[in-house]
Amino acid sequence: MEKALDGLELIEQYFSDFTPQQQQQFRQLAAVYTEWNEKINVISRKDIDSLYLKHVLHSLAIAATHHFEPGTKVLDIGTGGGFPGVPLAIFFPEVEFFLVDSIGKKLKVVEAVKAELNLKNITVQHTRTEDIKGRKFDFAVSRAVAPLASLWQWSNKLIIKAHKQEVPNGLFCLKGGDLSQEIFESGLRPTLQSITTIFKEPFFEEKFVVYVPK
């Protein structure tokens, strides 16, 4: 049960080799999000106590399925309070993350987390994904923002076709439930990985990492 573990212990059940700085950054998340969530509600009150399970570890399901090489540029679509972008930025300190959301007050929390944790590899911008100009990315990531068809429509034009990694550039999104209709309507042929094959907690049942290659 998560209650028996602190946040870092929960994460280190599945990941190892963090630097002392990464360990400290993961530990700091609870205090920073708890403080800011009282000012600007970006995480439901009932979920703040399960921050590491429902938000941090969930975000890291992407890291468990794919390694982003140093120098990779990643767009976080509709980041909200910073998920999955913030945990991924801690996990991949040499990867550049561009976190966007159309709701400015949520990004105040992300900016505060970025400053408190000294996350130099995060850029934050108040914009809609479809309005981004002059930037290109290797990958896009997203969690529970919009239907797959919309996510691909917004991100496809921003993702570079050429790729330098084993997995082609594309979109990774975290989704749950029966996705058959959503996938059918998108006209895409994504790869789905069940998160319960990665993390054992019951929370991850019927949750998936969805990958669409460019």
Image: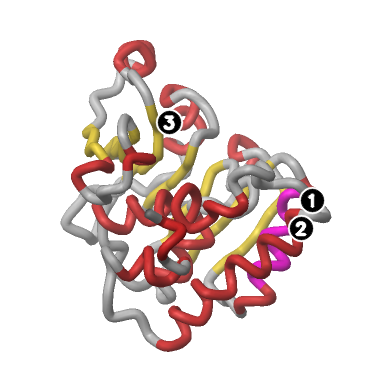
**Residue sitting at 57 percent across and 67 percent down?**
122
Q: Specify start and end residues of the magenta stretch as a single range.
A: 106-114
Could you tell me what secondary structure mostly forms the magenta stretch? Answer: helix
Above or below, comparing residue 109 to residue 121 in the picture: above
Question: Which residue does the numbered mark 2 point to in the structure image?
Answer: 108
Instruction: Determine crowd level at label 3: few under 14, some 14-19, many 20+ residues with C-alpha closer than 10 A.
Output: many
Is residue 129 shown left or right of residue 89?
right
Q: Determine which quarter of the picture holds residue 70.
A: bottom left
User: Residue type at mark 3?
Assistant: Trp
**Residue sitting at 32 percent across and 47 percent down?**
201
**Residue sitting at 47 percent across and 85 percent down?**
21
User: Residue type at mark 1?
Assistant: Ile
Q: First in sequence, mark 3 or 2: give its number.
A: 2
How far across and down, in percent of the image, does residue 42 sit?
69, 47
Question: Which residue does the numbered mark 1 point to in the structure image?
Answer: 40
Mark pair 1, 3: CA separation: 29 Å
Question: Which residue does the numbered mark 3 point to in the structure image?
Answer: 152
Image depth: mark 1 or mark 2 in front: 1
Q: Do the residues labelled 1 and 2 touch (CB within 8 Å)?
A: yes
How far across and down, in percent of the image, does residue 119 sit?
57, 75
Mark pair 1, 2: CA separation: 8 Å
Is residue 212 shown left or right of residue 182?
left
The N terminus lies in quadrant: bottom left
Q: First in sequence, mark 1 or 3: give its number.
A: 1
User: Residue type at mark 2?
Assistant: Lys
Indicate the secondary structure of the residue bearing disc 1. loop
Closest to the observer: 35 or 178? 35
Mark pair 3, 2: CA separation: 26 Å
